Amino acid sequence: MQMTRTFDQVRLLVFAPTRRAASETFIRANLKGLPFQLKAYFGDERPLSEPMRWLYGCAIWLSKLLTRLRLLRAAGLPAAWVARLLIRRHQPNVVLAEFGFEAVRVMHACRWTGVPLVVHFRGSDASARQRIGLLEDRYRSLLRIAAGIIVKSRPMADRLALLGASRDRILISPSGADAALFHHSAPAQSAPIFLAVGRFVEKKGPLQTIDAFARMLAGCPALPADVQLWMVGDGPLLPAAQDLVQAQGIEDRVRLLGLRSQVEVAGLMREVRAFVQHSRVAADGDSEGSPVAVMEAQLSGLPVIATRHAGIPEVVCDGESGLLVEEGDVAAMALAMVRLVRDPGLAERMGACGRQRIQSGFTVSHHLEQVSNFLETVHRSNRSA
């Protein structure tokens, strides 16, 4: 897919929380794919050899400390002062802040300098009560200052609109799946194995996924002996998941594979029958945006069993490219699993439908084009103002 505009004269300055965390791989990949003159600063970096990066990292650390102390007005100043220095140094046309909680730390620098700010919300920063509740007043200020807002799903856009975001400044753009990696799954020819990929945290529903799988096995003893559940990821709920597998007596059917690279995940998707994920709203309000792994599975050609949660119904067509159930309904998820074990032809048809759907509008290339056009539009609007 070709970009529809010329971008190489646009200077983009990016502020993001971290370059290193495995969970933020997609941010690094997306930044590499943006066609601008780009400089990026990360809040967890403090290299002594690069004074401005060191200074920004220290300012973010101080902002976090002040936030924990509930000194919220003061917390918005250290990173903003350093960001203003960086704006003067790099002379960007647009500033992009990754995550709302990073944006509130630099927003005043954009207000002081007149450089338009675009904020990229990605999930918990627009849903978790510990974020929204603590930062609500600062978010309202942010949404007045921001020239543009990027979100992952319609529910996320609705949430921010309630806080004051102007809908005509919002771009809904799921992060998308990488067509170079995710392809050529053959669910009808694969063993009846279900694959789950994601952090072992409450909103991903790993315990509900295991529970549904165990119910399927208990309710249908005549299922093939090679039915399995493979789970990729790590996180705070991993010990509970291990305990649940043991309590259900299904250690021989569930493989907890730990962290795997994207290349390894893509390979696993070519070995299984279907993708499964029981996303749900966590107790603290944390919610998905539009899970990338769901799009990657569909692009590979796998049917998806998931929940009607956040942006999932926007990318999975229930009954066509997958089977959706209500949050918490593990019995319905178990029945959906049974259908795809018993009917590999249905899995193949749904997988083909999902592949076509993602190819038509939900790849990384689509996302990069949408974001690039949006940022360039913000730049042109500011220039003509």
Image (spheres, helix red, strand yellow):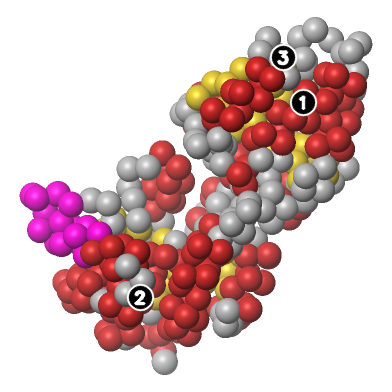
Label 1 secondary element:
helix
In this rendering, the answer to whether 124 lies above or below 297 is below
Query: What's the mark number on residue 10?
Result: none
Disc 3 element? loop
- Residue at 68% in and 45% down: 279
Instruction: Report the residue at 14% width, 49% height from top.
Output: 47
Q: Is residue 210 above or below residue 375?
A: above
The residue identified by callout 3 is 249
Q: Amino acid at mark 2?
A: Leu
Residue 317 as seen in the image, left or right of residue 164: right
Q: Position of residue 263 (x, y in %)?
A: 49, 27
Point out the tag, 2 or 1, that comes first from the N-terminus: 2
Above or below residue 366? Residue 351 is: above
- Judging by the rendered image, the residue that carries numbered circle 2 is 72
Query: Pointer 1: what residue?
Result: 213
Residue at 69% across, 56% down = 310
Q: Position of residue 29 (x, y in %)?
A: 42, 46
Where is residue 358? Give x, y as percent. 68, 45
| 37 left or right, relative to 132 | left
Q: Nearer the viewer, residue 340 or 200?
A: 200
Can residue 199 be spotted in the picture? yes
**Residue 56 lies in the magenta stretch:** yes
Residue type at the position of mark 3: Gly
Part of the protein shown in magenta:
46-61
Q: Are marks 2 and 1 in contact (CB under 8 Å)?
A: no
Q: Nearer the viewer, mark 3 or mark 1?
A: 3
Magenta includes 176? no
Name which residue type carries label 1: Phe
Q: Is residue 179 above or below residue 382?
A: above
Left or right: residue 280 versus residue 371 is right
